[in-house]
Image: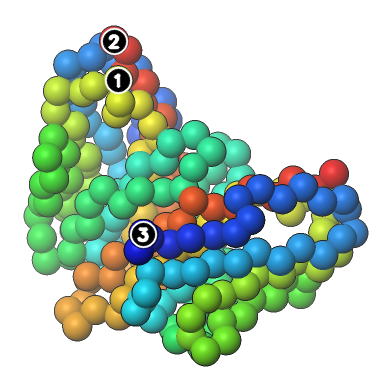
Amino acid sequence: KQEVTQIPAALSVPEGENLVLNCSFTDSAIYNLQWFRQDPGKGLTSLLLIQSSQREQTSGRLNASLDKSSGRSTLYIAASQPGDSATYLCAVPPGGSQGNLIFGKGTKLSVKP
Amino acid sequence: DTGVSQNPRHKITKRGQNVTFRCDPISEHNRLYWYRQTLGQGPEFLTYFQNEAQLEKSRLLSDRFSAERPKGSFSTLEIQRTEQGDSAMYLCASSSRPRTSGLDEQFFGPGTRLTVL
């Protein structure tokens, strides 16, 4: 059964700092991994999707890496800004399927001015 | 706007009442998903459709829950005889069936927040 863990549960950093969020999953037979951002009381915004054949994906100040064999992904945020404050969620499909996503509990990020 | 839309955004109901939520996916997306999220947790999968066919249902989807996607366009999620434990954010997502494995990116709507008193 696929399980997703995100560490840390919460993180507070000063503005301008570079930071790394971690995600691990138990079944490495995944087709892809998605990172999302969620603002309080809102829906999810897709940030990055990494296919299983890729090692990393970049979008602006965000860089996500995937080590499928070890069941790990990281989301790197460069030069953090107060507007980056949100909960970041990673999600993977169950092993061997492309259907629904299984989510971690998220990392709540606070960037202080 | 071509994003996923959900209505209503908020619903307050009394225990025992029935409620229905609607989701309009991104046009031409043939896959549609329903998730439920409670405070401090990640979303949990409820059910998913490919076109009008309901392909998978989670054990979370008790017999009080029913979902439909007539004609493969919008979808509705109905909860009968609501209970206080049904209070949550109900999220809808859609995706298109990709030609290449691994490109099934899901896009989420703003959610419907249900409060059962």
Q: Nearer the viewer, residue B60 or B29?
A: B29
The residue that appears at 22% across and 41% down in the rendered structure is A74
Q: Nearer the viewer, residue A54 or B69?
A: B69
Gap in angstroms between the C-alphas marked 1 and 3? 27 Å
Give neighbour class at mark 1: few <14, some 14-19, many 20+ (Cα, 10 Å).
Answer: some
Q: Which residue is mark 1?
A: A82
The residue that appears at 82% across and 59% down in the rendered structure is B82
Proximity of marks 2 and 1: CB atoms separated by less than 8 Å: yes
Gap in angstroms between the C-alphas marked 3 and 2? 33 Å
Q: Which residue is mark 2?
A: A113
Image side of residue A99 versus residue B104, left or right: right
Q: Chain of mark 2?
A: A
Q: Which residue is mark 3?
A: B1
User: In the rendered image of this protein, does residue A102 appear above or below residue B102?
Assistant: above
Whether residue A26 appears in this view of the structure is no
**Three-letter residue code for mark 3:** Asp
Image side of residue B58 versus residue A73, left or right: right
User: In the rendered image of this protein, does residue B55 appear above or below residue A60?
Assistant: below
Quadrant in the picture for the N terminus of chain A:
bottom left
Image side of residue B103 versus residue B56, left or right: left
User: Residue B90 appears at what percent x and percent y?
Assistant: 59, 56
User: Residue B81 appears at what percent x and percent y?
Assistant: 86, 64
The secondary element bearing badge 1 is classed as helix
**Three-letter residue code for mark 1:** Pro
User: Residue B43 appears at what percent x and percent y?
Assistant: 51, 52
Q: Chain of mark 1?
A: A
The residue that appears at 36% across and 59% down in the rendered structure is B1
Give neighbour class at mark 2: few <14, some 14-19, many 20+ (Cα, 10 Å).
Answer: few
